Image (cartoon, rainbow, N blue to C red):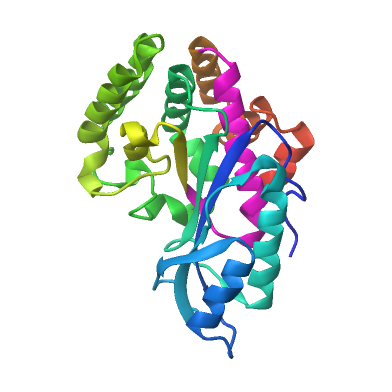
Amino acid sequence: MQEKINKISYQDNYQFGLELECGFDHTELNNAELSNKLASIGFRRDRDYHDTGARIDGIEAVTNGVVNTDNINNHVNSFIELAEELHYRTDPMQAGLHINISREDGDFKNRTLINIITLFYSLEDVFYNIVHSDRQYNRYSGKLQEMGRYDNIRLFEEFRQDLFELEELEKRPFNELRAKLRELKGKYFDFNGKFNGLAIHKLEDAEHRRCLEFRLFDGKLENLKFYIELTQKLLKFSEKNTVFQVKNLINKVNEKPKSNQAQYLLKRIGFTAKEAVKLMK
């Protein structure tokens, strides 16, 4: 297996929780033995999952607790090693990787949340061009544009305007931002009953202010470190830049030919030019 990147870099004091929907083709392993093997590397079997086509079909392997930035490489390497041993299988259309990321030192600032929501959903097409193309159609993690409401161009423009108006809440109490996120969720997200590429349902709940959940990723082993690195870099960019700078990046990306947008975005959020070209092959 050739990984997209060899090592996840240290960006900041982040914490991670991974959820991998997958199956295994090991011919002698039973479910209890699989659970024990996962537990030995810091994962737990969260639930059954039935869309991978594997012999042991299938499970959601979830990080047991959280893993900090210093240990994330070991955590992922241990899973990859076990997955290859047990003949891991995943289906990009039906199964994927969810990455939960939070800060070790407290809540996200309003500006960070506003920036990352605006960036992700303003450039949704670009982000889904980075992952396996089938992910956009998954009912639990797909594009808003594929879920039935977003084909209305008027509603698309309305949604984008609402995103850009979140800036007004940057310095307001978090309760006001949470109320606005709840309003957006009801207006644009609830029609499919579940979630999309970036799980806004957690952000509008005060209990989950500390956690962002990215759901758009496929679960291919060669992509795991790249996707974790991508979430880190997106978060770091959203933390250190102003709302104006994020909007400027959105406009710059949209000015590029569609074939170059993903590479340009990757470079702007912190990947080298060489990395950006390699990652989009």
* Residue 152 percent coordinates (x, y): 24, 34
* Residue 239 percent coordinates (x, y): 56, 21
Specify the principal SS of the magenta part: helix
**As drawn, is 259 to the left or to the right of 165?**
right
Q: Which residues are magenta?
A: 216-242
- Magenta stretch: residue 217 in it? yes
- Magenta stretch: residue 205 in it? no
Residue 37 lies in quadrant: bottom right
Residue 151 lies in quadrant: top left
For residue 165, say whether it is visible: yes
Which residue is located at x 40 percent, y 31 percent?
Answer: 209
Which residue is located at x 53 percent, y 49 percent?
Answer: 17
Q: In the rendered image of this protein, does residue 115 appear above or below residue 56?
A: above
Q: In the rendered image of this protein, does residue 192 appear above or below residue 158?
A: below
Q: Please state the total of marks drawn on the protein image.
A: 0
Viewer-closest of 194 and 211:
211
**As drawn, is 49 to the left or to the right of 275?**
left
For residue 149, say whether it is visible: no
* Residue 115 percent coordinates (x, y): 47, 22
Which residue is located at x 53 percent, y 53 percent?
Answer: 18
Rendered-image quadrant of the N terminus: bottom right
